[in-house]
Image (cartoon, rainbow, N blue to C red):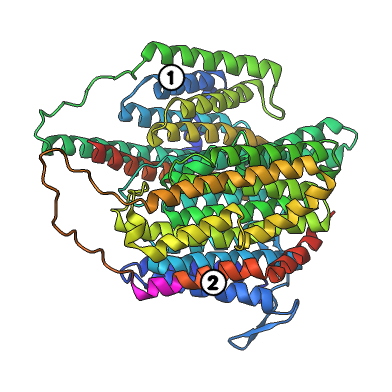
């Protein structure tokens, strides 16, 4: 733990505007890309920068625990994505169709220009929203990051009815809220329960994603 | 050692964990969880307040306050009645899951959720109740859809709406803490009121946040859907009454008398209008629940003991209709390959299940002589004399789900006889007779049908319990 805290201390210079930029990058990975590997990476990055920002408002040990929960969530999403892809490929093989190779390069979501515009809209809405309704009790960069994540999460939820992609929105929204509420409520029990909720939501989303894909297979 | 009300939280969770590991024996988990929930429910309702229980030579006083993670856990009289209702409703649904259950996660997770709902009602401050409710709602999603079967829109929407409701409840708690330090800042109070109202509108599925209600019915497993509509909704109602009790200025606000009845009215109208359409029995049940919620909100807005009593009575009787209909639907779905959309004419294959759908549906729609009618009539008769316009409108929208139900039952009982084409010989082969309904299933359905009709003919017992409970929440 001491070593990890020392690492956090060494990278604490990132825990301000660089982290907000990092969150923008993570959000763009979630919004614009389509590959599940990129989504899992995006979620991991998102929780990393959220934990960095959290070191400014709560105890570093607690931020570290939140980071571990976030990485577990990213890993869960990675495993789910891998499972879904494998099952999809197996279903295609049994139908004796030529097996489509999964794209190995960075794949962009369908309607990429629209999604890029949405990302821009999220950034503008977050900045404008922060200027109009600045969040109390948190520094400017942290407040902006919270609004960015909350608005980005809402957009992600609205963009897809698929559990996996909509679930990414839910998790992003919860991460933003957790960052804000951590500054308001210092109780460890509350922080712990919020972390538990995030992890359970991630599990529920992956469960729903699996049942949803089954229906897709049935329809085929 | 003081355990206080802790067994009410721990025992259902332990039963749920045990049921999970006993899933190999199909009948055991629902019976175990139903038994534990029923015993706890009866104990809460029958045991005199403050009387100690003797367990293993030790005296346990359920009302003795204890501390859980540094937070107070207290069991008041109102909590006992509310929890008793939730446990008995859960027990009824687990019992039905014994014969009509699909998916083996309902009993284990449902029992754990009952324990969490116990925590929601007993723990203070209310911020922890909101967090525990979110955990409970997330757990329910796991059992809402059968593994590797069917779409999952309902679960996703329910999870989304519950998650969106969480920040409002948590931030309002912080705002109210600030308000106690600086009572001159009225804006804090206004923002907190708005956040609390927004959160409960999401959790109750009020218009325009009602999307999750029909979606859950549309593709969720029937009995788990009934659990969401009754036990989870019951948890939300009691949490909301807890908020109104803890923060009495919420009902003193100028908006209360105007906004709450208007929201209830609009929700009932939307549910009633959409309930006339034929979109499958599960979705229909969602619209019927919307009408019920709207009516209950109109009753609650009256702010009197009788008004709150009517709202609680509507919640109590909803269990009968929702559970009975869910059992019937589940049975019919099992006969038609497990898909939510039932094929035309399937009702003839299982007449008792069809009767359960009809009686349960009539109760959900509030039609006499079922349990649902008694609750509605108490509200509508009062409204027709004091506010005839609202009363007439609510009476009219109550008919909407009935129209939808007639269409659903018509579809279930429609006989299909393919018309032979010209030159084609009519198929004279005899179709295979469907297997008769198992005797235990029929007995269970008859028990619930009888209870639904009897509670409609003799509604005093439930109405009195609801009125008594309302006395603890009246402001």
Magenta span: helix, strand or loop, mainly? helix
Chain for disc number 1: A
Helix, strand or loop at disc 2? helix
**Which one is in front, A184 or B310?**
B310
Give the quarter of the image for residue A33: top left
Residue B450, numbered label:
2
Residue A28, numbered label:
1
Looking at the image, residue B443 lies above or below residue A206: below
Q: Residues within 10 Å of mark 1 (few under 14, many from 20)?
A: many
Looking at the image, residue B63 lies above or below residue B258: below
**Which stretch did the figure color magenta?**
B438-444
Query: Which residue is found at the position 39% from the left and 10% from the top?
Result: A113
Position of residue A174 measured from the top left corner of the image (x, y, whole percent): 54, 36
Q: Residues within 10 Å of mark 2 (few under 14, many from 20)?
A: some
Same subunit, tags 1 and 2? no
Position of residue A69 measured from the top left corner of the image (x, y, whole percent): 46, 42
Query: Which residue is found at the position 58% from the left and 43% from the top?
Result: B400
Position of residue B86 measured from the top left corner of the image (x, y, whole percent): 60, 63
Chain for disc number 2: B
Query: Which residue is found at the position 44% from the left and 41% from the top?
Result: B279
**Which one is in front, A175 or A4?**
A175
Residue B440, magenta (yes or no):
yes
Q: Is residue B81 left or right of residue A93?
A: right
Asked if residue B93 can be seen in this view, the reply is yes
């Amino acid at each position: 733990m001491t070593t990890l805290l020392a690492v956090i201390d060494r990278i604490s210079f990132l825990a301000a505007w660089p982290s907000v930029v990092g969150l923008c990058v993570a959000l763009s990975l979630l919004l614009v890309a389509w590959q599940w590997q990129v989504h899992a990476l995006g979620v991991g990055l998102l929780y990393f920068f959220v934990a960095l920002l959290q070191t400014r408002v709560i105890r570093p040990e607690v931020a570290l625990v939140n980071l571990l929960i976030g990485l577990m969530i990213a890993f869960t999403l990675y495993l789910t994505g891998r499972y879904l892809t494998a099952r999809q490929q197996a279903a295609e093989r049994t139908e004796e169709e030529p097996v489509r190779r999964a794209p190995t390069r960075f794949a962009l979501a369908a309607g990429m220009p629209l999604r890029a515009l949405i990302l821009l809209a999220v950034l503008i809405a977050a900045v404008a929203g922060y200027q109009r309704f600045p969040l109390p009790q948190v520094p400017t960069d942290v407040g902006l990051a919270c609004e960015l994540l909350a608005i980005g999460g809402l957009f992600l939820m609205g963009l897809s009815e698929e559990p996996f992609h909509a679930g990414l929105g839910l998790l992003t929204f919860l991460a933003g809220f957790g960052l804000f509420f951590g500054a308001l409520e210092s109780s460890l029990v509350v922080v712990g329960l919020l972390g538990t909720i995030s992890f359970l939501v991630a599990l529920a989303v992956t469960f729903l994603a699996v049942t949803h894909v089954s229906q897709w297979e049935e329809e085929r | 050692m003081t355990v206080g009300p802790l067994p009410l939280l721990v025992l259902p969770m332990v039963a749920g964990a045990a049921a999970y590991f006993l899933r190999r024996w199909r009948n055991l988990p629902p019976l175990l969880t139903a038994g534990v929930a029923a015993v706890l429910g009866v104990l809460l309702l029958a045991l005199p307040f403050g009387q100690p229980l003797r367990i293993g030579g030790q005296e346990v006083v359920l009302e003795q306050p204890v501390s859980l993670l540094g937070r107070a856990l207290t069991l008041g009289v109102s909590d006992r009645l509310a929890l008793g209702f939730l446990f008995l409703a859960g027990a009824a649904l687990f019992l039905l899951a014994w014969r009509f259950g699909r998916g083996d996660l309902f009993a284990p997770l449902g029992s754990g959720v009952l324990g969490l709902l116990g925590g929601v009602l007993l723990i203070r401050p209310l911020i922890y109740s909101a967090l525990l409710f979110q955990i409970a709602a997330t757990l329910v999603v796991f059992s809402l859809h059968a593994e590797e079967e069917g779409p999952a829109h309902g679960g996703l929407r329910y999870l989304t709406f519950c998650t969106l409701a969480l920040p409002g409840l948590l931030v309002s708690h912080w705002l109210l803490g600030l308000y106690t330090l600086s009572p001159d800042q009225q804006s804090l109070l206004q923002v907190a009121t708005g956040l609390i109202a927004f959160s409960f509108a999401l959790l109750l599925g009020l218009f325009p946040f009602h999307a999750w209600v029909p979606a859950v019915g549309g593709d969720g497993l029937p009995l788990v859907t009934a659990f969401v509509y009754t036990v989870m909704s019951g948890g939300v109602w009691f949490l909301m009454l807890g908020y109104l009790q803890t923060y009495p200025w919420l009902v003193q606000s100028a908006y209360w008398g105007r906004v709450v009845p208007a929201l209830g009215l609009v929700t009932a109208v939307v549910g009633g209008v959409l309930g006339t359409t034929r979109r499958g029995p599960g979705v229909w049940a969602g619209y019927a629940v919307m009408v019920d919620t709207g009516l209950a909100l109109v009753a609650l807005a009256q702010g009197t003991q009788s008004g709150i009593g009517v709202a609680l009575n509507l919640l109590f009787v909803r269990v009968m209709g929702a559970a009975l209909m869910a059992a019937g639907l589940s049975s019919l779905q099992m006969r038609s390959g497990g898909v939510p959309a039932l094929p035309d004419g399937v009702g003839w294959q299982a007449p008792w299940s069809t009767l359960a759908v009809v009686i349960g549906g009539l109760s959900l729609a509030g039609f006499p002589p079922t349990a649902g009618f008694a609750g509605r009539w108490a509200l509508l008769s009062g409204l027709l004399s004091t506010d005839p316009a609202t009363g007439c409108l609510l009476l009219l929208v109550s008919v909407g789900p009935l129209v939808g139900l007639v269409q659903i039952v018509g579809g279930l009982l429609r006989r299909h006889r393919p018309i032979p084409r010209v030159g084609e010989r009519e198929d004279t082969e005899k179709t295979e007779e469907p297997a008769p309904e198992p005797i235990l299933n029929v007995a269970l359905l008859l028990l619930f049908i009888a209870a639904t009709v009897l509670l409609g003919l003799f509604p005093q017992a439930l109405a009195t319990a609801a009125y008594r409970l309302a006395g603890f929440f009246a402001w």
